[in-house]
């Protein structure tokens, strides 16, 4: 019973992963949508990792997944702060204008 549930949930994770990778490919011009899609891909991979660790009864994998969730949250906060500061200076969030950051 639980193996069937694991297979179905893994298929859902794979489908969501593919959809978000396509979203990254099609929305490369807007940095905000690009980073949100990239962060969602990371979260989907981490949830799948945590679910697999729970399935094989591995507590170390769950601890690693929790640590990576915290790391992803801090990465999101820093990326959003950079985008907000860039938007205040340029009033755009397109990737073409990020070459101005190089100095």
Image (cartoon, grey):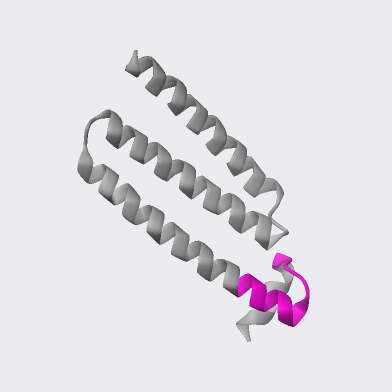
In the figure, 45 relative to 38: above or below? above
Tell me which residue sits at (69%, 80%) in the image.
Answer: 100
53 w.r.t. 101: above or below: above
Q: Can the viewer see residue 56 in this picture?
A: yes
Residue 99 makes an appearance in the image: no
Q: Estimate the x, y position of residue 41 in percent, counting from the top left.
A: 52, 46
Residue 12 placed where, x, y %?
51, 28
Q: Quadrant of the C terminus?
A: bottom right
Q: Position of residue 64 (x, y in %)?
A: 28, 50
Q: Is residue 90 magenta?
A: yes
10 sits left or right of 91 in the view: left
Residue that extends furthest to the bottom in the rendered view of this protein: 103
Quadrant position of residue 67: bottom left
- What is the quadrant of the N terminus in the image? top left
In this rendering, position of residue 38 left or right of residue 99? left
Residue beneath the point at 21% across and 37% down? 58
Q: Position of residue 3 (x, y in %)?
A: 34, 17
Camera-side residue: 78 or 27? 78
Q: Quadrant of residue 95?
A: bottom right
Predominant SS along the magenta part: helix
Seen at 78% across and 75% down, the residue is 91
Q: How many marks?
A: 0
Residue 97, above or below 33: below
**Residue found at x 36% / y 54%:** 68
**Relative to residue 42, is residue 65 drawn left or right?**
left
Chain part drawn in magenta: 82-95
Q: Is residue 9 magenta?
A: no
Extreme residue in the top direction: 1
- Please determine whether, in this image, residue 17 is positioned above or below residue 40: above
Residue 29 appears left or right of 69: right
């Amino acid at each position: 019973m639980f193996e069937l549930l694991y297979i179905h949930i893994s298929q859902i994770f794979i489908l969501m992963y593919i959809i978000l990778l396509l979203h990254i490919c099609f929305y490369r011009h807007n940095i905000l949508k690009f980073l949100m899609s990239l962060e969602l891909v990371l979260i989907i991979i981490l949830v799948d990792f945590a679910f697999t660790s729970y399935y094989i009864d591995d507590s170390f994998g769950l601890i690693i997944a929790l640590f990576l969730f915290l790391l992803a949250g801090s990465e999101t906060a820093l990326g959003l702060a950079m985008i907000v500061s860039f938007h205040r200076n340029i009033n755009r969030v397109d990737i073409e204008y990020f070459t101005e950051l190089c100095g």
